[in-house]
Amino acid sequence: MPADEPPPVASVIVLGYNGRRYAEACVESLLDQEPGTAPYEVIWADNGSSDGSADFVAERFPAVRLIRFELNLGYAGGNVRALEHARARFVAFLNQDTIVGRRWVRGLLEAREAAGAAAVHSNMILPWEPCASTWSREEYHPHVHVAELTRGGYVAYRRVPRVDWVPTLFVSGAGFMVDRDVLPEIGAR
């Protein structure tokens, strides 16, 4: 990091595994956050891919820090190892097969602060919903897609009118932010 560059407020970790077909759209959306977003870094943690995705990210996106694991450490193992490389207090984890809106980083930081929460997750624009094909990254989505557990322990989805934040029982691993200062308190590192 150059001496005149402020430290990041947020680190975004994308755990990649043979995701070359997703890498460009995902990383482009992360690097195209609206002006005024707090300083953040993007880390692509390659989980032992064999499809050239790590090389593609390195060549196409020099602003992204690339970390290569020799083996596929799995979802949890890869993210825990990648966390060791994050420089910010607030760390977002994002699936490689996603794209984010232009206010994604700012929105997670603002929701966390407004809710006083240790962890928050973003609105998941579900690909099977008709609204997914017409959504523009420039706009707020008109609905919030909420994932909840049913009595049988299955995940159920519901759509509610857009609000700034909705309390939830769990965060979705596909796109969430956590205050890393609370991780030792819950037995995580």
Image: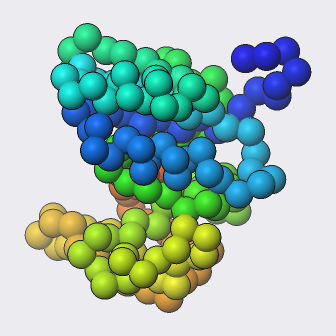
Q: Quadrant of residue 51?
A: top left
Residue 101, x across and y down, in percent = 55, 62
* In front of the other: 154 or 17: 17
Task: Give the residue at the far left of this rendering.
Answer: 152
Q: Quadrant of the N terminus?
A: top right
Q: Quadrant of residue 151?
A: bottom left
Q: Residue at x 47, y 83 (%)?
A: 143
Colour pattern = rainbow
* In front of the other: 11 or 102: 102
Q: Is residue 6 above or below residue 69?
A: below
Q: Is 146 positioned to the left or the right of 162 in the image?
A: left
Residue 166, x across and y down, in percent = 52, 73
Task: Give the residue at the far right of this rendering.
Answer: 4
Question: Does residue 94 appear anywhere in the picture?
Answer: no
Instruction: State how many labels appear.
Output: 0
Residue 142, x across and y down, in percent = 52, 85
* In front of the other: 132 or 7: 132
Q: Is residue 145 above or below residue 9?
A: below
Q: Is 98 positioned to the left or the right of 6 in the image?
A: left
Q: Is residue 163 above or below residue 34?
A: below
Residue 67, x across and y down, in percent = 43, 18
Task: Give the residue at the far top of this rendering.
Answer: 70
Question: Does residue 69 appear anywhere in the picture?
Answer: yes
Q: Is 59 positioned to the left or the right of 152 in the image?
A: right
Q: Residue at x 36, y 16 (%)?
A: 68
Q: Quadrant of the C terminus?
A: top left
Task: Give the residue at the far front of this rendering.
Answer: 59
Q: Residue at x 31, y 30 (%)?
A: 53
